[in-house]
Image: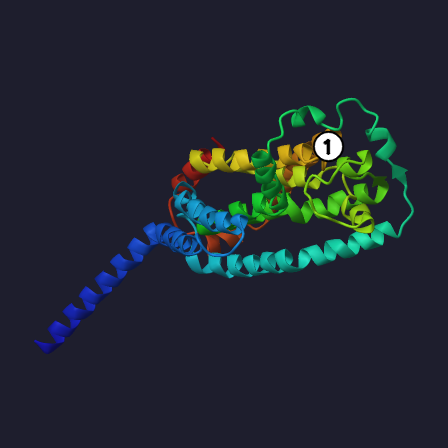
Amino acid sequence: MLNFMKKRVLRTSKAMLLKAFDFLNKYYFIIIGLYFLYNAMKIVYANTGVDYKAFKFLLAFAAFTAYSEIRKDVKWIPYLLLAVPFLMFLSYINVHGYAFWGKMLSWQMSKNIVVDLNPIFSKIPLNDAAFLRVYKPETLTWILRMVYNNGFVLPILLPIYRAAISKDFKKMVRYALSGHIVQVFLITPFYLTFHLQEVWYVLGHPDGLARNMTPAQAAGVSLNCFPSMHTSIAFAAFLLVMREKNKLFKYVWGFFCLSVIFSTMYLEIHWVIDVLAGMLFAYGTVKLVDFVLDKGKILIQSILRSYYYKSIPSTYISNYYTNLLQ
């Protein structure tokens, strides 16, 4: 009788644990979203920047809209073994990347100018995008300054976090490679070849970002305009975000990405040709990353089936990718 009771308790406990795990497995994204929302609400009245507060709310938004993208065919442990180190790597880049970029700028300024585009671009009609600044209220300027200041990292970073919540490691890699990692290597030869500075600096206007720099600082910061990397990062993010299934996230974040591109011209940072070149550059980078990842997946398909994906019917996987491409 005692053994029977023990077995019954064990079976009951096991059943309860399985139900709890199943509940967490289905609704963990809501728990994560509520955690981010709680942290965002705590700092609403704190003495921190508006952009930081907005980022906290955006994390909650990303989590709540991740449901339709959650990968149910992926095992948790192999996924975490890949995703956690990758997120740590991105965190390291986010902290130390600007220092590396500053060293590259210093090295670049020590070299002789190869092709000076300043006099050429300043003479091209409409290239300064003045037609976008006919109406320039202070509120819009303040908003677009905040958009631009966060437009180098945030367009890619938030979708990466959302892909992490969705258990989609391939999407995380796709965003990271398309947005920054591959772009830095491909765009550097352009910056070493073409000398082009920001619109306001070349035309002698006040700095659109009101950075209060010395002449020496302004000469260094205003470098590397062709092509616009703010544009290429934001447009690469836009192209990838348009593939997301959740319409709310797709259109809200797509609008933000396009706002980054608009801000570069509104604030007299980039020339129109810079922006067009940045968009073309982004398109080429996204297609290149698509090609590399698709070929790479074919090479490691057997490993993925054995260790990464769950043993589920092939029809599920087929339907998943069919929906993904729609």
Secondary structure at badge 1 equals helix
Residue 149 coordinates in the image, percent (x, y): 63, 45
Residue 105 coordinates in the image, percent (x, y): 79, 51
**Position of 281 compared to 218: left or right?**
left
Q: Depth check: 250 or 127 in front?
A: 127
**Position of 239 compared to 127: left or right?**
left
Q: Depth check: 271 or 141 in front?
A: 141
Does residue 149 appear in this view?
A: yes
Q: Depth check: 46 or 132 in front?
A: 46
Residue 219 coordinates in the image, percent (x, y): 82, 46
Residue type highlighted by circle 1: Ala
Q: Which quarter shows the N terminus? A: bottom left
At x 61%, y 36%, the residue is: 141
Q: As drawn, which residue projects farthest toward the left? A: 1
Q: As drawn, which residue projects farthest toward the bottom? A: 2
At x 13%, y 76%, the residue is: 3
At x 85%, y 35%, the residue is: 118
**Position of 23 compared to 50: left or right?**
left
At x 73%, y 32%, the residue is: 277
Does residue 226 appear in this view?
A: no
Image height of 2 relative to 206, above or below? below
From the image, tell me which residue sits under label 1. Answer: 277
Q: As drawn, which residue projects farthest toward the top? A: 125
Residue 143 coordinates in the image, percent (x, y): 57, 39
